[in-house]
Amino acid sequence: MGLVAATAAGRRHAHRLAAAWPHARLVEAENVADALRAAWREYDAVVAFLATGAVVRILAPLLADKRTDPPVVVVDEAARHAVALLGGHAGGANALAAEVGALLDARPVVTTATDAVGLPGLDTLGWPVEGAVAAVSRAILDGEPVRLVADATWPLPALPENVRVEVAPLPTDPVTAGDDGSAEGWRILVTDRVVPLDGRTVVLRPPSLVAGVGSSRGVPADEVTGLLRRALADAGLSPASLSCLASVDLKADEAGIRATADAYGVPLETWPAADLAAVDVPHPSEVVRAAVGTPSVAEAAALRHGGDLLVPKTASAMATVAVARQAPRGRLALVGLGPGAADLRTPRAVAELRRASVVVGLDQYLDQVRELLRPGTRVLASGLGAEEARARAAVAEAAAGHAVALVGSGDAGVYAMASPALEYADDRIDVVGVPGVTAGLAASALLGAPLGHDHVYLSLSDLHTPWEVIARRVAAAAEGDLVALLYNPRSRTRDWQLGAALETFAAHRPPDTPVGVVRNASRPGQRVHLATLATLDPALVDMYSVVVVGSSQTRVVAGRMVTPRGYRWRS
């Protein structure tokens, strides 16, 4: 990322970004115009601490295409605003403005129509897009009826109510508006097939096709490329939907195949011959088996992950190709919302919430993020005690092909929803884990630095774990002299377990060992209490609290709980 500044204040702001982003560099030149042009040429993104008008005049002659121009964000002298000037949503300027704003405490200014009203841009879904993108996007914004027709359920973001989703065979003829100007003709097609276009149609190309490739040694790249191009065209399939090329691992270094993958902009996946030999194919060959150890390369590689064979193996002088269509894979994002404060919620968590069409979670957690969800998001909320049902619901929605976010507080993998969800998830869905700031980390930051050395997380809830098991773990932590973070420490019906745990720690540590209690970390009603093993009153603790028990080396310094990074025996 190139940073450009003309004044001392601008350079101070730029240095703040450079300190936070190792990939950011302040671009210097004889004058600021030359610096800005250099940043434009040499970097993937530009942040300019200049007047908007000056940036426009300098960069206007350099503009080429929004798909290739770097995003540009402009920040004013006082760092009050971060303006997404060029590169909008497709180029990433809107997201960059939000990130710059978060670091400089500046307000992001976004004027892209879809982003401004919370709608997904048709050219920002990560898939190739063809057709009347601007016209159909405008129809969506204007609330006109739009049909989204897909030949399968794909994990798309939420769409507003005026977009009617249909999973059905695709039409083969162009659709035009009626004489009355009806907008029923606005449509979005999601398909890997070549379909006719008109001025009211957008086609999204999902990554559904796998091309299996076999070849003789030394096959020319243009032979492989030409054979694949003809095979796709004859089958009426779009090369924009290719997700990868696949072959036997003996061909991993075949220059012609690798060059073909590069030409199509997709990866090359290779498999051991034994794996491909286990794939059932319609046209096995004993000649191929004798040569490479599998009766099929092209068809078997195309079908390695299942799916339907659309193009059986077809050959040229030195190459064979086959094309399979894979079923859509749903998407399950396991999102940790952090301890509660909005500024401790990660940008990635926000992005996943806006990427989802279905959001599942505890009702009180969903209330924290409803304003972040896109219009049309389906929300599945439930109350306390329904963890298993939430996990099953999220996995079922993802297995049906949807983009799902399963939310929890803190980090989704720490005493939260990731574990139960992954017990039910299988390999039909893609899983994305989004780390979050845990309640323990938030409590530690408020107390000082109690986690400076080895530590352990323990839950005192015996609803799903017998107390005998918990007690053994507490004893092990106490004997091991580990700092302990106690979750679920005390409730109205479980009011003795915390006292029992503290007695165990007291048997192995001095009575003046620091103990911290943080209630509602980063949320309204936050309270921080510092005591010792001898003085802590368990009545101060409830289910909204995290208890941090220090090790024998933990001490209080200037009112803060500190555990040395290297154990030093107290004098």
Image (spheres, helix red, strand yellow):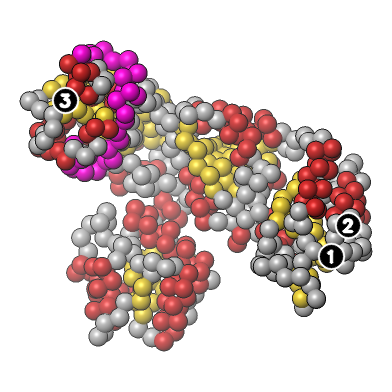
> Residue 533's spot in the image, x, y percent?
88, 61
For the residue labelled by badge 3, is the local secondary structure a helix, a strand or a loop? strand
Mark 2 in CB contact with mark 1 (< 8 angstroms): yes
Locate the N terminus and report the quarter of the image it occupies: bottom left
Q: Is residue 76 magenta?
A: no
Q: Quadrant of residue 21?
A: bottom left
Q: CA distance from mark 3 to mark 1?
A: 72 Å
Q: CA distance from mark 2 to mark 1?
A: 8 Å
Labelled disc at residue 83? none
- Mark with earlier residue (2, 1): 2
Which residue occupies the foreground of this view, 446 or 13?
Answer: 446
* Residue sitting at x 43%, y 31%: 329
Labelled disc at residue 506? 2
According to the picture, the residue beneath numbered tag 1 turns out to be: 513
According to the picture, the residue beneath numbered tag 3 turns out to be: 320
For the residue labelled by badge 2, is the local secondary structure a helix, a strand or a loop? helix
Q: CA distance from mark 3 to mark 2?
A: 73 Å
User: Please, what is the three-letter code of the amino acid marked with disc 2?
Assistant: Ala
User: Please, what is the three-letter code of the amino acid marked with disc 1?
Assistant: Thr
What residue range appears in magenta?
257-286
Locate the C terminus and report the quarter of the image it occupies: bottom right
